[in-house]
Image (spheres, rainbow, N blue to C red):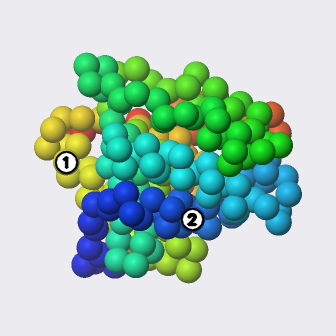
């Protein structure tokens, strides 16, 4: 599909972006370990994602397509211009995740332990509305920011949460590294993209 318009989003869309990500991520394996209660899973995920999206609005780049069918949250990771951590993160995480806070903190530790150090832009989230997946929305979002990354000779990094994600990102120039895993064995694949 061509002609998918991508725009930068502002802070007023923070909650909507977080909800879109939560909706799209429900099909993944990791959320089942993070929030075992299926009835509360989507709302807890949206609460945690809202913290990161808010941080992206302040210190990164948040993009969306028309109607927010797809969203992407990029966080620059540049040593000479590093952003502060999300404000009041521990308290906000506990408020959002309740009894499952330790699981989200464990995931944060895994992400930090596997995060590369060279300057790059980190794709924290790429999410597409479930009924629009496989129609080029995610690819349009990737191409949009990759154009900037390539023009500025900046690598990209992400953690893919599924084999479908690995396949998509590989088509856009990302190379998968050895996966790291949640305690239940669910893998995440660190993926790195050199600028073209």
| Residue located farthest toward the right when viewing the structure as drawn | 37
Mark 2 → mark 1, Cα distance in angstroms = 27 Å
Q: Residue 162: in sight, yes or no?
A: no
Q: Position of residue 79 (x, y in %)?
A: 31, 20
| Residue located farthest toward the left when viewing the structure as drawn | 151
Classify residue 137 by image quadrant: bottom left
Instruction: Please name the residue shown 34% across and 40% down the image.
Output: 59
Mark closest to the chain's N terminus, 2 or 1: 2
Q: Name the residue under label 2.
A: 19
Q: Residue 148 carries which label?
A: 1
Q: Where is residue 100 in the image (x, y as percent from the top left)?
A: 79, 43
Q: Nearer the viewer, residue 119 or 186?
A: 119
On screen, residue 124 above or below 143? above
Quadrant, the N terminus = bottom left
Q: Is residue 105 left or right of residue 135?
A: right
Circle 1 Cα neighbour tier, 10 Å, few/some/many (<14 / 14–19 / ≥20): few
On screen, residue 22 above or below 163? below
On screen, residue 164 above or below 181? below
Instruction: Please name the residue shown 62% across and 58% down the image.
Output: 46
Instruction: Please name the residue shown 57% across and 65% down the image.
Output: 19
Quadrant, the C terminus = top left
Q: Nearer the viewer, mark 2 or mark 1?
A: 2
Q: Nearer the viewer, residue 126 or 37?
A: 37
Q: Residue 13: in sight, yes or no?
A: yes
| Total residue callouts | 2
Classify residue 119 by image quadrant: top left
Q: Are circles 2 and 1 on residues that touch, CB within 8 Å?
A: no
């Amino acid at each position: 599909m061509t002609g998918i318009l991508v725009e930068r989003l502002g802070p007023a869309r923070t909650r909507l972006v977080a909800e879109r990500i939560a909706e799209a991520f429900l099909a993944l394996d990791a959320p089942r370990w993070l929030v075992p209660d299926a009835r509360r899973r989507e709302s807890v995920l949206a609460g945690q994602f809202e913290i990161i999206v808010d941080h992206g609005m302040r210190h990164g780049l948040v993009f969306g397509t028309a109607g927010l069918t797809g969203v992407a949250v990029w966080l620059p990771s540049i040593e000479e211009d590093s952003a502060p951590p999300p404000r009041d993160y521990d308290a906000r995480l506990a408020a959002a995740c309740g009894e499952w806070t330790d699981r989200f903190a464990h995931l944060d530790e895994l992400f930090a332990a596997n995060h590369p150090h060279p300057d790059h832009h980190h794709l924290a989230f790429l999410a597409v509305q479930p009924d629009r997946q496989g129609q080029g929305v995610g690819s349009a979002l990737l191409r949009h920011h990759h154009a900037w990354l390539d023009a500025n000779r900046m690598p990209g990094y992400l953690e893919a949460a599924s084999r479908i994600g690995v396949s998509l990102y590989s088509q856009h120039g990302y190379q998968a590294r050895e996966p790291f895993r949640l305690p239940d064995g669910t893998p995440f694949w660190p993926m790195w993209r050199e600028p073209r």
